[in-house]
Image: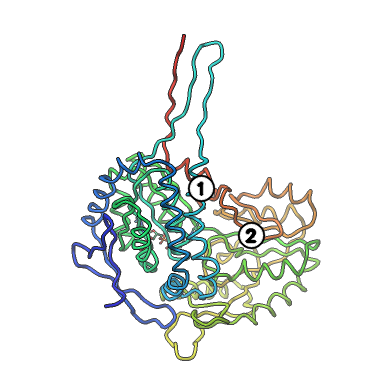
Amino acid sequence: MANTIKNYINGQYENPINSNWLDNYDPSNGEIYGKTPNSSKEDVEQAYLSAQSAFEQWSQTTLEERSRILLKISEGIESQLDALAEAESKDNGKPISLAKSIDIPRAASNFRFFANAITQFASESHESVGQNAINFTLRQPIGVVGCISPWNLPLYLFTWKIAPAIAAGNCVVAKPSEVTPMTAYMLGEICNKAGLPKGVLNIVHGLGTTTGQAIIEHPNIKAISFTGGTATGAHIARTAAPMFKKLSLELGGKNPNIIFADCDYDAMLRNTIHSSFANQGQICLCGSRIFVEKSIYEKFKNDFVEKVKQLKVGHPAKADTDIGALVSKPHLEKVLDYINIAKQENGTILCGGNRITVNGHENGYYLEPTVIEVPNEHCRVNQEEIFGPVVTIMPFGTEDEVLQMANKVKYGLSATLWTNDLNRTMRMSNQIQAGIVWINTWLMRDLRTPFGGVKASGVGREGGFEALRFFTEPKNVCIKFK
Ligand code: NDP
């Protein structure tokens, strides 16, 4: 079968040892279009052994050489932009325009960024004045590390972990989501062409509960970088803690988008459409709770709903599609369940709320972009992560009131503020419980900045030198001299 995905171990494509396969679905039409390994513990062990045997040499490879290879991988991704974007769009259901402009370019940037960052990464020294001693910190690679990523931004998030891990001299056992394995599969060949030594990167495909589980409970995989749901993150933490693994957990979000009357209204409206519905709302950073100052609430409500109704839901491969298909049938059903919960909780569906049929693709997982006016901030649709094209809106009176409502969720990933009052910007940025605060913008990313959340949105930070710190062990060396 043309679309048979294989594991990438020791630089070779391999079938799963147990010959077990999973179906791979095309969300745009609900059809099976390929198969992917349902890898077992034995495959993970092979991947581990391959990584382990590559480690000694890779960890001693000069920074210049590592950087050169990472840059080549970046160029390899860029040279296959169209093929990778098509594969990502087909596997995930996202509009091809988004895959081409965001997902794949960002995967290339991840490698380019860490190729450069590793050459600038420095460690500290401390002179113990008056004691004739100097301390310095060695930053050593950890060994074999595990990288596990979700389906929403497949290659983008997969490479966000792999690039710093290998730049820092580690060898990797990585697992993409089994729902979207295709671009991770294609990455293997790109790495081979770029001259990445065999075994530095190993990719095993399969279910989280089997393949992923084998990675997190492997006694010699010393660190896990995970992006995914909060419940999975808690399970990984429980499993890894007794083995004292290093953990970076990037988890769910329920991010507030707070709109004050003094904002630049047109820019806010334009951006709020994106922050609500980009990638079918399946971005952990989407502003899924919209709070609007009372004086402009009715105007915003009318303008926003009118714009949302104009969004074109369609086949992901069409150039004019704004909203493609949701990633899977179970996910579509979960999002529809939340729309029903909203109705039971006296929410008002201002637009959307229904599954859509796209001509010629009747079994695809399409959903209208949905805006729900909620009666209070406590209701479930305002508290729980839906992760689909669904936002809630409600008015607020004062800054204090909206701050309380914004913070009253278990999550703390990101927040967006729309205001031109600099003092308010500072007051609120200080007090909002989130790892990232955007003022008058959304999803503007500089890869040097720390990325991650607080509360149930995760532990640790990735991005820039934070990622290189995560993927290295600091060792203090103290020298006494005469
Ligand atoms: P999941 O937590 O279900 O899965 C994430 C990854 O973990 C997948 O590769 C999955 O495998 C794997 N996995 C599942 N169970 C285990 C296990 N027991 N051991 C090891 N690995 C396991 O999340 P989704 O894929 O559904 O992604 C959506 C979630 O990701 C949302 O909550 C979203 O907010 C969050 N997310 C967070 C981001 C952040 O940066 N904070 C960014 C993007 C998304 P498989 O899929 O094959 O079962």
Mark 1 near ligand 1 (CB under 8 Å)? no
Q: From the viewer's perspective, is residue 240 above or below residue 274?
A: above
Labels 2 and 1: the sequence-earlier one: 1
Percent across and percent down for residue 422 are: 78, 51
Q: Nearer the viewer, residue 173 or 245?
A: 173
**Cα distance in 3D space between marks 2 and 1:** 34 Å
Percent across and percent down for residue 357 are: 49, 87
Q: Which mark is residue 116?
A: 1
Q: Relative to 376, is 60 on the left or the right?
A: left
Q: In which quarter of the image is residue 32?
A: bottom left
Tell me the colour scheme of the image.
Answer: rainbow
Mark 2 near ligand 1 (CB under 8 Å)? no
Q: Give the number of the mark in front: 2 or 1.
A: 1
Q: Residue 47 carries which label?
A: none
Residue under numbered circle 2 = 256
The amino acid pointed to by label 1 is Asn
Percent across and percent down for residue 2 are: 29, 77
Q: Which residue lies furthest to the left in this view?
A: 18
The amino acid pointed to by label 2 is Pro
Q: In which quarter of the image is residue 361?
A: bottom left
The quadrant of the rendering that contains the N terminus is: bottom left
Question: SS class of the residue under badge 1?
Answer: helix
Question: SS class of the residue under badge 2?
Answer: strand
Q: From the viewer's perspective, is residue 338 above or below residue 142?
A: below
